[in-house]
Image: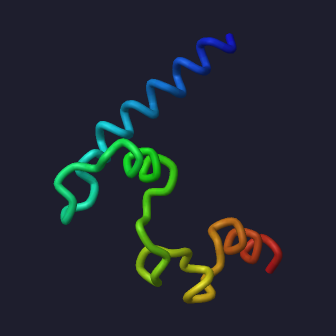
Amino acid sequence: MKNLSRTLRRHHAARLKKKRQYYYSWVKKLDPRQLGIVLNTVPICSCYMCGNPRKYFKERTVQEKHWMQVVE
């Protein structure tokens, strides 16, 4: 089973690398190092548009919203 999970993980990594090869419009093609970075961290920055809405807008998560409905 261990080899199958490794194979599946490698398959998904290759699939995402192929999909995100031209991910950013201002770069024609990412080099292998940049592609590995984009594989694990998709957003290029942490501005209010790309970052966590909880940090910038103090929004509650879906779980917290659900919990507040159940409690009240």
Relative depth, front residue between 27 and 41:
27
Residue 64 position within the rendered picture, expressed as x and y whole percent measured from the top left:
72, 72
Which residue is drawn at the image coordinates 80% and 80% (left, top)?
72
Rendering colour mode: rainbow
**Most distant residue in the bottom direction:** 57
Drawn side of residue 14 relative to residue 55, left or right:
left
Q: Position of residue 70 (x, y in %)?
A: 77, 70
* 72, above or below 61, in the image: below
Horizontally, residue 49 falls left or right of residue 66, namely left
For image coordinates 69% across by 69% down, the residue present is 66
Residue 15 horizontal/vertical position (percent): 36, 32
- Quarter of the rendering occupied by the N terminus: top right
Residue at image location 21% in from the left, 49% down from the top:
29
Front position in the image: 64 or 3: 3
Asked if residue 58 is positioned above or below residue 5 in the image, the reply reads below
- Res. 60 image quadrant: bottom right
Residue 25 position within the rendered picture, expressed as x and y whole percent measured from the top left: 19, 62
- Whether 62 is drawn above or below 49: the answer is above
User: Residue at position x 38%, y 39% from top?
Assistant: 16
**Which residue extends farthest right?**
71
7 or 26, nearer to the observer? 26
Q: How many marks?
A: 0
In this rendering, position of residue 63 left or right of residue 10? right
13 vs 28, left or right, is right
Up/down of 6 relative to 18, above or below: above
